[in-house]
Image (cartoon, rainbow, N blue to C red):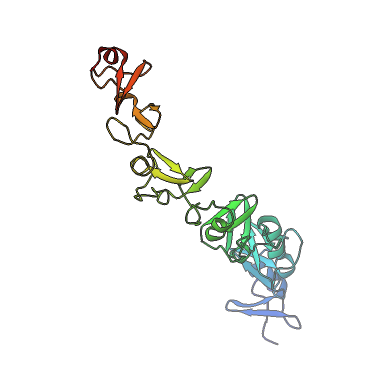
Amino acid sequence: MSEAFDCAKCSESLYGRKYIQTDNGPYCVPCYDNTFANTCAECQQLIGHDSRELFYEDRHFHEGCFRCCRCQRSLADEPFTCQDSELLCNGCYCSAFSSQCSACGETVMPGSRKLEYGGQTWHEHCFLCSSCEQPLGSRSFVPDKGAHYCVPCYENKFAPRCARCSKTLTQGGVTYRDQPWHRECLVCTGCQTPLAGQQFTSRDDDPYCVTCFGELFAPKCSSCKRPITGLGEGKYVSFEDRHWHHSCFSCARCSTSLVGQGFMPDGDQVLCQGCSQAGP
């Protein structure tokens, strides 16, 4: 008699049948699959010993069941992503969850370098200055009517220029004669004192501080000999080729103010009518 050669589970003879040898003895194919095979997470069927089995995150799949849940494309030899427990090929994942570059219209692939601004997305190499077309990367930029400019290009293209030095004004500045000036460029033509925030006047479009204007151009008061600028000293009185501050226009004898009153010239002096009639 021949020695018994039976399946370790069902005890049926394995003579003339296909079997699989294990550490626990030989198994016929059905018993082996029922005992050791894993269940496919997709179709819930056993993955037979002669099937290619794929394993991902504690789940087992037939090769044909391991596919994109949207396009059904096999993922056996393809890169894929798991999103909310669903397997997706790269194409479906990008279509569903990736953004498009606002410049080139291509998909911004997951993990690639990108820039986001104002609800839009760009490949890093596509986010360029609208003027010099150099990548902006992490540099400062200025948005303007849908365009984006690096700071130097924006200043050259749009920023106002100082009426004196012709350089751009990037911040602050003052306006004189409807033109922009750097605060440090608006200075007195005479003494170079900064005029921003100060009272000043001009002559032939050149700005002057009150002191320089008075010394250089203003008439002198016939009484105190100080300049009459009309700035900060109120009104003044003129008679023939002489001029007086209001506060200085008074009778040379009694010191009565002559502003709005009748007066008489007496040489280099002016007298009120009472002193004039009184005689020397």
> Which quadrant of the rendered structure holds the N terminus?
bottom right
Q: For the view shown, which residue lies furthest in the bottom direction?
A: 1
User: Does residue 245 appear left or right of residue 52 in this picture?
Assistant: left
Viewer-side residue, 28 vs 99: 99
Visible residue check, residue 87: yes
> Which of the 4 image quarters holds residue 105?
bottom right
> Which of the 4 image quarters holds residue 211?
top left
Residue name at image x 64 percent, y 74 percent: 8
> Residue 89 location in percent, x, y?
70, 64
Query: In this rendering, is residue 236 above or below 159?
Result: above
> Which of the 4 image quarters holds residue 251?
top left
> Residue 249 location in percent, x, y?
32, 24
Residue name at image x 67 percent, y 85 percent: 3
Query: In this rendering, is residue 142 above or below 136?
Result: above
> Residue 34 location in percent, x, y?
68, 67
Q: For the view shown, which residue lies furthest in the front direction?
A: 279
Viewer-side residue, 271 vs 185: 271
> Which quadrant of the rendered structure holds the C terminus?
top left
User: Does residue 181 appear left or right of residue 14 in this picture?
Assistant: left
Residue name at image x 28 percent, y 35 percent: 225
User: Does residue 184 appear left or right of residue 73 in this picture?
Assistant: left
Visible residue check, residue 84: no
Viewer-side residue, 188 vs 173: 188
> Residue 104 location in percent, x, y?
70, 63
Query: In this rendering, is residue 209 above or below 160?
Result: above
Number of numbered discs overlaid on the protein picture? 0
Viewer-side residue, 26 vs 77: 77
